[in-house]
Image (cartoon, rainbow, N blue to C red):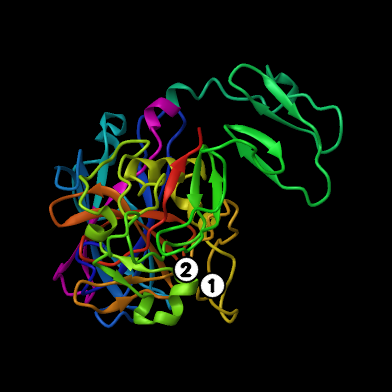
């Protein structure tokens, strides 16, 4: 989201191996982006120049690859390219050691097609470890389920099994309409009967109750935070109605600056995170590491967004996404909605088209990591945002 006040660029990246499985690195990176002008209008059916730069070990790290491409947007403002097939190239994708650490893709955009690269945008490449994949390619599953060892065994329809760390344990079939809860890591029909770590409805200082959902080992808010007070009753400075409309808070929650979300605590990137911040007692603001873990649990950046987005789409009543709400199936139960964001100048952007979520992790003195859901893409995208922007907040906790 850095430098996107003038021009909006939403992108997703997917990495594909274009060589045999014995190769050490990909020869091309599939790239797509939606380009908007300064008025937030799609740049439709127009040529744009994009300079692709790959940086090692950080958003301001060493440049290991650079090239330029002239692309044509379609009617929806979408451009597609294969990084590695451009001109004026410096470096080679095949020479990059993808297992050596983190890599970032920096794009410099010339939206007018006149060689004036005025827009810069950097995002982390969350790629597969190609070298490791190549080394393990020979140890693949035959495709025959019976070849698996230590596989679960059932004896009746509806029976389930879970792994307790040492063996498969059976859960008897439930009754029609019965709810399955996960209590201290164990699936149980009906509500949990213990204290502390049981799923339930957390309540903030203002009395707002929140639905929650278990995704992997963590329990997440299944709706956006609405509170005007911290857990100790202190008023929150930096809370805003989505799109400036108080009537929408009921459906989309509030937007908060990063400083408001952190409540004076130090930035953190551990997993589990350590920052309670704006969240109710017993809950915390997720770190970037926890967001990465969530993304990987749901199948990776390119697919996770659809599993996190609500199915509700215009012209249905609020809360809803603008059409087409690409890939949405809400498989996770996260029920993400497009509350948009508040810009540093007080304007609003993306209501109905984008859901922006803070983490407790920072990039620099004025930038923090956030995550984006977008109405026309099915991914969940990590990107930096100015700390004075207003984003949504989803709280998380571990179930012990």
Q: Position of residue 250 (x, y in %)?
A: 48, 73
Residue 229 x/y as whole percent: 33, 63
Q: How many marks?
A: 2
Q: Residue furthest right?
A: 156
Residue at the spot of label 1? 324
The answer to which image quadrant residue 261 occupies is bottom left
Q: Which residues are magenta?
A: 106-133
Q: Earlier in the sequence, mark 2 or mark 1?
A: 1
- The answer to whether 145 appears left or right of 369 in the picture is right
* Direction from residue 333 to residue 378 in the image, left or right: left
Residue 144 x %, y %: 72, 26
Marks 2/1 in contact by CB < 8 Å: the verdict is: yes
Task: Using the image as rendered, state which of residue 190 and residue 164 is in the foreground.
Answer: 190
Check the image and report above or below for 26 versus 138: below
Give me the disc on residue 362: none
Quadrant of residue 2 in the image? bottom left
Give the number of the disc on residue 376: 2
């Amino acid at each position: 989201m850095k430098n996107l006040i003038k021009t909006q660029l939403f992108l997703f990246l997917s990495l594909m191996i274009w060589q045999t499985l014995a190769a050490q690195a990909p020869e091309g990176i599939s790239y797509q982006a939606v380009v908007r002008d300064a008025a937030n209008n799609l740049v439709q059916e127009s040529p744009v120049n994009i300079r692709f730069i790959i940086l090692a070990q950080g958003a301001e790290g060493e440049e290991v690859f650079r090239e330029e491409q002239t692309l044509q947007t379609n009617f929806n403002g979408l451009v597609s390219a294969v990084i590695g097939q451009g001109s004026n190239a410096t470096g080679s994708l095949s020479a990059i050691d993808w297992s050596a650490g983190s890599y970032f893709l920096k794009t410099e955009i010339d939206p007018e097609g006149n060689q004036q690269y005025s827009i810069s945008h950097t995002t982390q490449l969350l790629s597969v470890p190609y070298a490791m994949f190549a080394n393990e390619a020979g140890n693949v599953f035959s495709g025959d389920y019976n070849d698996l060892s230590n596989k679960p065994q059932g004896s009746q329809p509806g029976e389930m099994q879970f792994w307790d760390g040492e063996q498969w344990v059976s859960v008897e079939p439930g009754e029609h309409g019965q709810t399955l809860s996960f209590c201290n890591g164990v699936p149980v029909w009906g509500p949990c009967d213990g204290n502390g770590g049981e799923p339930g409805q957390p309540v903030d200082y203002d009395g707002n109750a929140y639905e929650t959902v278990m995704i992997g080992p963590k329990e997440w808010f299944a709706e956006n935070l609405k509170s005007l007070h911290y857990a100790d009753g202190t008023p929150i400075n930096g809370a805003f109605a989505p799109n400036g409309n108080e009537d929408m808070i009921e459906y989309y929650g509030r937007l908060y600056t990063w400083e408001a979300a952190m409540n004076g605590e130090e930035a953190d990137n551990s997993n589990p995170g350590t920052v309670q911040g704006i969240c109710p007692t017993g809950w915390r603001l997720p770190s970037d590491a926890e967001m990465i873990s969530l993304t990987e649990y749901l199948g990776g950046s390119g697919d996770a967004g659809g599993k996190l987005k609500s199915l509700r789409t215009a012209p249905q009543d609020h809360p809803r996404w603008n059409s087409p709400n690409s890939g949405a199936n809400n498989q996770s139960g996260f029920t993400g909605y497009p509350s948009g964001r508040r810009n540093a100048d007080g304007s609003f952007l993306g209501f109905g088209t984008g859901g922006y979520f803070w983490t407790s992790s920072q990039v620099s003195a004025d930038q923090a990591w956030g995550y984006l859901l977008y109405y026309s893409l099915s991914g969940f995208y990590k990107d930096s945002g100015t700390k004075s922007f207003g984003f949504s907040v989803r709280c998380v906790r571990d179930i012990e």
